[in-house]
Image (spheres, rainbow, N blue to C red):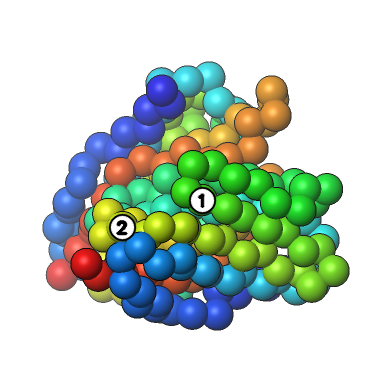
Amino acid sequence: DVKVTQSSRYLVKRTGEKVFLECVQDMDHENMFWYRQDPGLGLRLIYFSYDVKMKEKGDIPEGYSVSREKKERFSLILESASTNQTSMYLCAIRSRSGGLNEQFFGPGTRLTVL
Amino acid sequence: SQKIEQNSEALNIQEGKTATLTCNYTNYSPAYLQWYRQDPGRGPVFLLLIRENEKEKRKERLKVTFDTTLKQSLFHITASQPADSATYLCALDDQAGTALIFGKGTTLSVSS
């Protein structure tokens, strides 16, 4: 079974703090994604990466950055957390080879910024 | 840009009935469409994928149809059970084929 783990299930931070959310996969998948999910807005893509050190902006990258130094690890960074970044953050992976088109999601991190 | 819509935010049905959820899309002709289930506080879980040349796909009590002329997919759960209560998301590839675009989801509640 594919396993995607996220560093925390719940996180509470203060405005202005630098926040790191980490995602780790146990497969050799190339593509990794960060989404945020908010009521009424659905899942929105923040950033994705299709290989080590490669990254692409999604629909809402403002206020976020990412890092992918190793294939299995994709980090989302909130440079200076703000209250409007309170949300559920979901990491996902996907393989580009072998016809595997579905995405596998991690359990999510519920981030609250006070 | 592509747009994907699930036209019901919520659907309430009685146990044993068939639930039918709708997904419509515009400005795009995807090669396939996917359906996911999401439970509260959890990440979405993949259920089914249907390709453009497939009219219908089944998996146990689940059935998905894909009408590329209407630009619509229907997701059916037959003999529904309270355990089927969840939010169901449809998704399709963006035009670059790298990321999925998700609908906002339909929350299904099955009462016993």
Q: Which residue is mark 2?
A: B81
Image coordinates of residue A16 in percent, x first then y, are: 24, 64
- Quadrant assignment, res A29: top right
Helix, strand or loop at disc 2?
loop
Residue type at mark 2: give it.
Answer: Gln
Residue type at mark 1: give it.
Answer: Leu
Task: Using residue A6 as the reference point, say whether residue B37 is left or right of it.
Answer: right
Q: Are marks 1 and 2 in contact (CB under 8 Å)?
A: no
Front residue of this view, candidates A61 and B94: B94
Q: Earlier in the sequence, mark 1 or mark 2?
A: 1
Q: Which residue is mark 1?
A: B62
- Quadrant assignment, res B69: bottom right
Check the residue under mark 1 and report the chain it is in.
B
Image coordinates of residue B92 in percent, x first then y, are: 66, 56
Tell me the number on the disc at residue A109.
none
Image coordinates of residue A64 in percent, x first then y, are: 44, 57
- Mark 1, Cα crowd under 10 Å, few <14 / some 14-19 / many 20+, is some
Per the model, the C-alpha gap separating discs 1 and 2 is: 12 Å
